Image: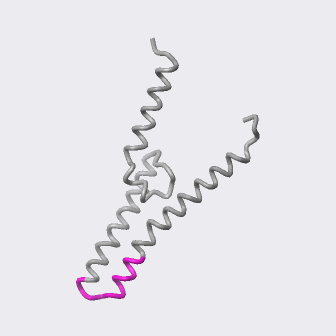
Amino acid sequence: MITRCKLAEQLRDYQVRSQHKWAVLTIFSPRPQISGRGDVIEALSWALLFSLLVVFSYGALHYRYFRLSSCLVFLGILLPICLAISRHRKLAKKRERRLLLPLSM
């Protein structure tokens, strides 16, 4: 017989597995947690953009376009920083909304 305790344990295990499934992509996700396919696609697109910036900066260095290469490196550094800032802002808004709820809820 399935008890409430077993169901809660199965749900907890499922949630832990689903959070660690895409743990590498959380660097490129603007959301704090990757919960669905849309979040995965968005994180993959940011990761692809980052890798393209790195490859193009190496190409620009190879052809001795130093200014272009430095601009691309700067954008490559700025991209994860901006994503981390947006992640932090969304978490702060979420915390603020929780504090605004009445205590009876």
Residue drawn at (50%, 20%), measured in percent from left and top?
5
Q: Quadrant of residue 36?
A: top left
- Check if residue 71 falls in the magenta segment: yes
Residue drawn at (64%, 54%), measured in percent from left and top?
93
Q: Is residue 84 above or below residue 12?
A: below
Q: How is the image coloured?
A: one colour
Residue drawn at (59%, 59%), measured in percent from left and top?
89
x and y, in percent, of residue 75 in the image? 42, 75
The quadrant the C terminus occupies is: top right
Q: Does 15 sit left or right of 65 as displayed?
A: right
Depth order, front residue of 5/65: 5
Q: Is residue 22 above or below residue 43?
A: above
- Check if residue 9 falls in the magenta segment: no
x and y, in percent, of residue 15 in the image? 45, 36
Magenta stretch, overall SS: helix
Residue lying at the far top in this picture: please name it: 1
x and y, in percent, of residue 31 in the image? 51, 54
x and y, in percent, of residue 60 in the image? 28, 82
Highlighted range, magenta: 62-74
Number of numbered markers: 0
The quadrant the N terminus occupies is: top left
